[in-house]
């Protein structure tokens, strides 16, 4: 087995705790908690179901593969070893671009909404609004540019801010419920429904994927063979609790219909922090700052891993110029790819601002769906690549193995794949399965835009990405032949 490409001057600085912190910072998606809680009581039920039915097998197969193939680039290397360079290039494009799209079209809008409401008024589409969003995007990018041995402490701080904010709101919600009663429980409806499942499955899968991300910095880990499986297991358990408990708390104390995707978490905080009396405003501002910092470092954590993947694709001759794959000699980071991500995120932010004439809720829903779609589409190739590596390279040492051997690995991998296929379809073509099984579905009421606008934005993004990835690959191939 030969690794596609390597970076010789990288320094190993990531310990087990650092890997877990990056995973927590990246995977626990603050911006989707309100979106999940908007599903009501059954959202709690479906979190538990997907944690068992999807996250457990997902963690098993990625823990084994991540420990067995710990090279820099992570999933890019895995897909290339399994299916070749072109497939790896196309897959990595979707994995990578999710993050500037998500940063510029989702995270920044949620952060700006919280800042505007609870810290300092920004207005909508004002100069202050644009300045805040530009500073947010480029602060996240610059965090990814910093050398990993220093930048890891920023993402660790972001993970801490995220867990602190979640704990404050969850504990306060419990205290609020004890004092005033858990009003939301009466109408929550914890019984699962098919319509609720189809509405929640893409966002829940999006919320639980990404634990393999730190493997993109595999050559910067001190002991990946031992640390990766433990880090995935611990961070997966932390993520499950970080979704389950806050969503349960929000649903329990919030009257039905009060939760929205873009403002759900902070609106729930505003409600329950009423028990603090005159201190409510200051505490809300504090939590809003934690919220924005956590979102910023969430974006930078994903940039750290995804930019490394895309840089490895470029260095391997798969994306326009090998220069985009250069790692800075002193910083040890793919600075050029980081800057390209910043430009992409900025462009997507500007496009999203004009998507629905300033309707932040509609922008958030549609752009989040684009991010969900592009990320889940990458797993359509990554997940079967894991099984292909298991079968093709049985001689590779595997410090951790999925129980029950190859059969157990195959069953877990295929179960994960079935979930991913379902999530991709529902994200790309919402309402189609609902109508097929006879569930009522009002597209405009759900998304705030017409189906034509939605599909143009989502399918158009997918088509553009395929074209860009293919052009980047073809450009490198032509240059290689010209030599």
Image (cartoon, rainbow, N blue to C red):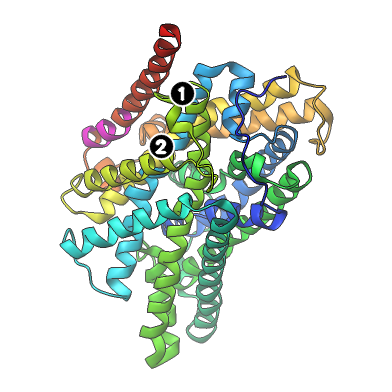
Residue assigned mark 2: 97
The crowding category of the residue bearing disc 1, from other C-alpha atoms within 10 Å (few below 14, some 14 to 19, many at least 20), is many
Q: Residues within 10 Å of mark 2 (few under 14, many from 20)?
A: many
Tell whether label 1 touches label 2 (CB within 8 Å): no
Residue 421 in view:
no
The chief SS type of the magenta part is helix
Towards the viewer: 67 or 473: 473
Q: Magenta stretch: residue 54 in it?
A: no
Tell whether 214 sits left or right of 347: right
Query: As drawn, which residue projects farthest toward the bottom?
Result: 278
Stretch of the chain drawn in magenta:
452-459
Report which residue position mark 1 lands on.
90
Q: Which type of secondary structure does the marked residue at label 2 adopt? A: helix
Query: Who is closer to the viewer here, 376 or 328?
Result: 328
Q: x, y (%) of residue 99?
A: 42, 43
Numbered circle sitting on residue 147: none
Q: Residue at x 64, y 59 (%)?
A: 238
Q: Secondary structure at mark 1?
A: helix
Q: Is 132 on the left or on the right of 11, as rendered? A: left
Question: Looking at the image, which is closer to me, 373 or 78?
Answer: 78
Front residue of 72/164: it is 72
């Amino acid at each position: 087995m030969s690794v596609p490409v390597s970076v010789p001057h990288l320094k190993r600085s990531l310990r087990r705790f650092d890997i877990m912190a990056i995973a927590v910072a990246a995977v626990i998606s603050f911006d989707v908690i309100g979106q999940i809680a908007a599903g009501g009581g059954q959202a709690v039920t479906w979190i538990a179901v997907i944690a068992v039915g999807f996250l457990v097998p997902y963690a098993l197969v990625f823990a084994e593969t991540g420990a067995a193939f710990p090279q820099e680039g992570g999933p890019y290397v895995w897909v290339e070893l399994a299916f070749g360079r072109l497939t790896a290039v196309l897959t990595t494009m979707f994995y990578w671009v999710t993050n500037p799209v998500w940063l510029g079209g989702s995270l920044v809008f949620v952060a700006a909404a919280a800042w505007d409401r609870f810290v300092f008024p920004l207005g909508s589409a004002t100069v202050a609004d644009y300045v805040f969003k530009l500073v947010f995007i480029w602060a996240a990018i610059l965090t990814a540019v910093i050398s990993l041995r220093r930048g890891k402490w920023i993402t660790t701080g972001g993970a801490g801010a995220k867990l602190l904010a979640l704990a404050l709101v969850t504990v306060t919600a419990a205290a609020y419920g004890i004092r005033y009663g858990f009003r939301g429980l009466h109408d929550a409806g914890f019984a699962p429904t098919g319509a609720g499942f189809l509405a929640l499955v893409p966002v829940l899968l999006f919320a639980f994927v990404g634990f393999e991300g730190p493997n993109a910095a595999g050559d910067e880990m001190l002991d990946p063979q031992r640390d990766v499986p433990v880090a995935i297991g611990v961070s997966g358990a932390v993520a499950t609790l970080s979704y389950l408990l806050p969503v349960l708390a929000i649903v329990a104390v919030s009257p039905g219909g009060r939760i929205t995707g873009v403002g759900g978490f902070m609106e729930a905080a505003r409600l329950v922090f009423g028990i603090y009396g005159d201190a409510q405003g200051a505490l809300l501002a504090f939590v809003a700052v934690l919220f924005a910092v956590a979102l910023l470092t969430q974006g930078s954590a994903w940039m750290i891993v995804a930019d490394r993947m895309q840089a490895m694709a470029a260095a391997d001759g798969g994306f326009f110029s090998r220069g985009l794959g250069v790692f800075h000699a002193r910083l040890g980071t793919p600075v050029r790819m980081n800057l390209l991500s910043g430009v992409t995120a900025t462009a997507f932010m500007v496009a999203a601002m004009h998507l629905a004439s300033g309707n932040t809720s509609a922008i958030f829903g549609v752009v989040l769906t684009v991010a969900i779609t592009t990320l889940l589409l990458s797993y359509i190739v990554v997940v079967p690549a894991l099984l292909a590596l298991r079968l093709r390279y049985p001689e590779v040492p595997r410090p951790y193995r999925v129980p029950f051997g190859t059969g157990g690995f195959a069953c877990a991998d295929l179960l994960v794949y079935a979930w991913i296929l379902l999530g991709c379809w529902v994200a790309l073509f919402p309402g189609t399965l609902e109508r097929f099984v006879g569930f009522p579905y009002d597209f405009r009421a759900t998304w705030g835009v017409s189906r034509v606008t939605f599909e143009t934005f989502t399918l158009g993004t997918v088509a553009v990405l395929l074209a860009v990835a293919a052009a980047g690959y073809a450009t490198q191939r032509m240059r290689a032949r010209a030599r």
